[in-house]
Image (cartoon, grey):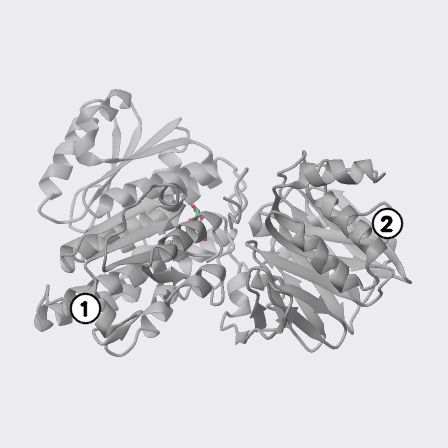
Amino acid sequence: MCGIVGFCGKNNCADLLIEGLKKLEYRGYDSAGIALEVKNKITVLKAVGQVKNLENLVKKSGKNSYIGIAHTRWATHGKPSLVNSHPHTDCTGNIALVHNGIIENYLELKNILIRKGHKFKSETDTEVIAHLLEEELKKEKDFFNAFQKTTRKLKGAFALVALSSKFPGVMVAAKRQSPLVAGISKKGFFLASDIPAFLSHTNKAIFFEDGDTIKITQDSIEVYDADFHKTTRKIHTISWDISAAEKGGFEHFMLKEIHDEPQNVKDTLQTLPPDITKAFGLPLKEAKRIEGLYIVACGTAYHAALVARYVIEHFAKIPVEVEMASEFKYRPIHFKKNWLFVAVSQSGETADTLAALKNAKAHGLKILSVCNVIGSAIVRESDYSVFTHCGPEISVASTKAFTCQLTVLYALALQLAYVQNSITKAEFEDLYQEFLNLPELLKQTLKLESAVKKVAKKVYKSPSFIFIGRNASFPLALEGALKLKEISYKHAEGFAAGEIKHGPIAIIDKGIPVVALAPKSSLYEKMISSCQEVSARGARVIFVTNTPSKNALEVPYTNEYLFPLLAATILQFYAYFIANFLGREIDKPRNLAKSVTVE
Ligand code: F6R
């Protein structure tokens, strides 16, 4: 999705804005642009393709300023082109504006503005806002008031930042459903779609509420709520280390982020309270009275939720319903009393998850979120939150966030199991001990990297890839297939191993690689049978297990419910190396955006 960076302060900012855009490249984009206020005029520069192209243009122009806005565009309305890229301007060229989100009533507004004589240059919904602001400024002398009135006329989702050469030194912004965060530094104020854009300059951040409008000058930041009343928003200190947003010598962010997993899981475990049976995410009273859970998420986070269903139902013995957020929000769900709604999201900004959460909240459910970003929209809407501590995830394909989500959800399962008396104290202590050993076991699992690479080399030319598993490893099969699809663009599918014979076996053909996820468990023999079924039809079985077995990728032994946390890294390596052998753009796969902030 689009990336926004704005700066207003005491320093020249062209470099800061370009650097910020580079840090947001992971969000996916097709063009980039910048607007600088130079000598009471707005200079707009745009380039199709990479931020590097824009950087060269800016350098060549020699333009600089202490106030400016920049943008990476991910096309929604109108094809990727120079004219459609942001910033957009009004008829006079005095106003420049960048936008992330979708303006639902843009056509209606555009027609009104055309009738009033406005001339449009692009096909975008965003340009309408620049002209609307121009129109408002004909009636209203104050830039910020006119901007606030403009936002009132917009329907849809947006993060907006605007400048006007008629009001030098003022940057105005608004947030409704799309992410926008301010960075407070000694150099000045940043506005951005995500923290990495300014993390190398400051770790002090303000997250805005939906409906907020913001006015920034060199020395001040003012925030107004949805009713335009002046308000204050908390300044958060971000604990992320800037090195987490760097590649650190790895060829790709994805590979680095897989290697980060032992440390990230360690950090996540270290933030658990000393006794999770007394307090963890939920107050004890709440944890005791819960009769069931709805866990809702999208994509990889949805797969983490599916794994958690098996773990929670096994240990805590309470029912769990898991649903994709994009479906959950439309179902006429008859919410059950004393059920808890759990939202799982790396970014905390996913529009589908947020909408499902709001639906559950409107029906009186208590909300627990499992998120990676403090202050994000999902966290702000939740009654309780637990954080994954994996720092910024830059690679579009989620890896370390998945493992940390599984870690938090496993801890939740153990907490609920204990407080609901589904396991004894002694059982809890044994399980917890094994759980705390996870970072060490993950480190050992990473040693399988070159073995996985060898396997990937043998199979990467296959047109199709299959993953099978049972119980808690079935959702892991889905995740393995998703990861591979995302970054290799190859057909990949995950199946419940027991389901293969009910139809999918028809696609098993000579040489098709089938990854079988088979931890030692009561279902182990059944997994072996499934492998025999597919290998009898010519499949090349790649056996992932935690018990000695010939020609297998063997991760360290744990109980079968912890197995997905270790085997996930094997599947992530597998997807990574296949995509790399195919020469794909691993960190920024085609058509994908990191944070999906539109429904
Ligand atoms: C896959 C991936 C996506 C996200 C999904 C939810 O690699 O990254 O499927 O998991 O868009 O995003 P969050 O977790 O930010 O809500």
Q: Secondary structure at mark 2?
A: loop
Q: Quadrant for residue 540, please give it.
A: top left
Identify the residue at horizontal 49%, vertical 62% (top origin).
376
Is disc 2 in contact with disc 1, using a CB cutoff of under 8 Å? Answer: no
Q: How many marks?
A: 2
Answer yes or no: is residue 366 visible. yes
Identify the residue at horizontal 34%, vertical 43% (top origin).
479
Q: Residue furthest right?
A: 39
Q: Is residue 463 left or right of residue 395?
A: left
Identify the residue at horizontal 76%, vertical 39% (top origin).
112
Mark 1 belongs to which amino acid?
Answer: Lys
Between residue 368 and residue 336, name the one nearer to us. Answer: 336
Q: Quadrant for residue 465, please give it.
A: top left
Q: Quadrant for residue 272, please give it.
A: bottom left
Disc 2: CA contacts within 10 A as few (<14), some (14-19) or many (>=20): some
Between residue 171 and residue 75, name the one nearer to us. Answer: 171
Between residue 133 and residue 588, name the one nearer to us. Answer: 133
Q: CA distance from mark 2 to mark 1?
A: 61 Å
Provide the residue designation for mark 1.
Answer: 288
In the picture, the disc for residue 525 is none
Mark 2 belongs to which amino acid?
Answer: Gly
Provide the residue designation for mark 2.
Answer: 93
